[in-house]
Amino acid sequence: MSATLKPCLIQDIAIRTEPTIYSQDPQSPAPRFFYGWAIVAICMLLGFLGTGFFSYSRGVFLPSLAETLAEGSRLKISLGFSWSAIVGALISPALGKFLDRHSPKRVILIGVSLVSMSYLFLGSAQSLWQFYLIIGLGFGVGMSCMGGMAWHRCIIFWFDHWRGRAIAFAVMGASLAGIMMPPLVTALVDAYGWRVGYYIFAGSTFVSLFPVVYWFMKDRPEDIDEVRDGRRYVQSHPADQVTIEEDGKIWTWQLLLRSRAFWSIGLIFGSMVCVFTAVMLHLFGHLLDLGLSTQEAALILSITAMFGALGKPLVGWLSDTFGARFTIWLGLLSQALALLLFTEATSFWSSALAASVYGFGYSGMSPMRTFAMSTSIGSHSFALGTGVLRWVELPFVLVASPLAGFIYDATGSYQIAFSILSGLLLVACIGPFFISVGGAAERKRRQREMGGSV
């Protein structure tokens, strides 16, 4: 039997509903394999071919795009990626509301189609305004539909007790792309040019993702007569089945904007996202300015992604075991230190050290963002909360990449830009004080408050 625990502080600003329950009998025969882990594997593939391709390759394409379409201005190309962020933020609240109530699978299929066509059109772009149109509308809408908000929504439908680890393994796909893509794309662009690179992206994205999502993605466990976490786990851990009332609460965007936890998450991950977008766009150019070859610079990006991938299982375990606050602080401080190391780097090996620290630091960005949102506002309105959060993060994202490009154009160096971004991450360390801990630590605390009764 499960116990309903005392509401936490955020209950004061949320609408009370019945807690989330299983729609089927958990005591039914348990299948040997929990299909939720197949969902995680599909999400890894989405991260690898979706956000991974887009995020980790654009820095390699940046010099070529600037020379071909923007008269050498990296600032103008950076503005295009900012336009993409604006469009994504504008549609995210409505998209999140839809995802909470309807089918994430359908949204992902639309996103895969849009992104594939956008790569195709981008390879044919002849002017800066065409680049802005394709990046802004095509990728702004497409990446929002097939990106993390949609498939994180699926994972939260499928997982509760294993949520931190499930999210961490799912987002490893993007990091694995980061390991492979910089050297591969660098060689591809050097050999065939950036246009051919985007044509290849178009074909590989559609052919690899559309059939897999169409045939194997399942929106919710009840679609295949399963339960969250799987019947086998539920039956073997009855004492852990603690019902947390906040998890089933329904939020509106007005209530979210009155939540201290929501604004704290916005500060934390707005800072992380803006630093990530700026670093991924400009780090390759910074490394070339240090005197590294294109292949050495690409290897540094791969090292960054490799440590990002290696850190994700650890981040998942830390979040499930110790909760969100400790794990977020560790990530913020690691990233801040890494940016300072990049400003002082003078060689391949000093750059590699900075890359490894930065990779570990941002390894928790995506899983901890989802974990913090789902534990602080609950899973019922997760996608809506994430969509509204994009509005809060938008000013951070809009400023970071163009500012770094402007500073580079004015000074010929990224050192000042990286120092400013490091300071922003230190300010964001205030945020974790105002969010829920979550994970096993939170459950144990609440069980103690109830006298350990279940």
Image (cartoon, helix red, strand yellow):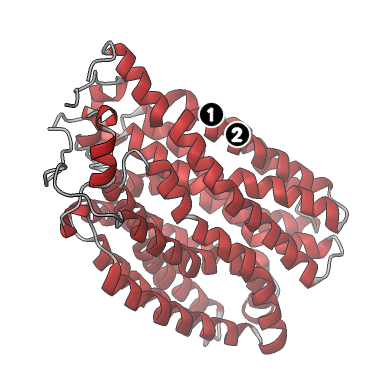
Helix, strand or loop at disc 2? helix
Q: Quadrant of the C terminus?
A: top left
Residue type at mark 1 is Phe
The x, y position of residue 453, in whole percent, is 23, 15
Helix, strand or loop at disc 1? helix
Q: Is residue 137 left or right of residue 157?
A: right
Crowding around mark 1 (Cα neighbors within 10 Å: few <14, some 14 to 19, many 20+) is some
Q: Is residue 65 left or right of residue 41?
A: right
Give the residue displayed 39% in from the left and 29% down from the top.
440
The x, y position of residue 38, in whole percent, is 35, 61
The x, y position of residue 162, in whole percent, is 37, 42
Residue type at mark 2 is Leu
Q: Report the front residue among 255 and 447.
A: 447
Give the residue displayed 54% in from the left and 48% down from the top.
312
Q: Where on the picture, by quarter, is residue 39?
A: bottom left
Look at the picture and state if 296 lies above or below 187.
above
Marks 1,2: beta carbons within 8 A: yes
Give the residue displayed 31% in from the left and 52% down from the top.
153
Q: Report the front residue among 254 and 111.
A: 111
Give the residue pinned by disc 2.
330
Q: Is residue 405 left or right of residue 12?
A: right
Look at the picture and state if 83 lies above or below 235.
below
Q: Is residue 228 visible?
A: no
Q: CA distance from mark 1 to mark 2?
A: 6 Å
The x, y position of residue 353, in whole percent, is 78, 49
Q: Is residue 347 left or right of residue 265?
A: right
Q: Is residue 141 visible?
A: yes
Give the residue pinned by disc 1.
326
Q: Where on the picture, by quarter, is residue 99?
A: bottom left
Q: Quadrant of the N terminus?
A: top left
Q: Report the front residue among 258 and 345.
A: 345
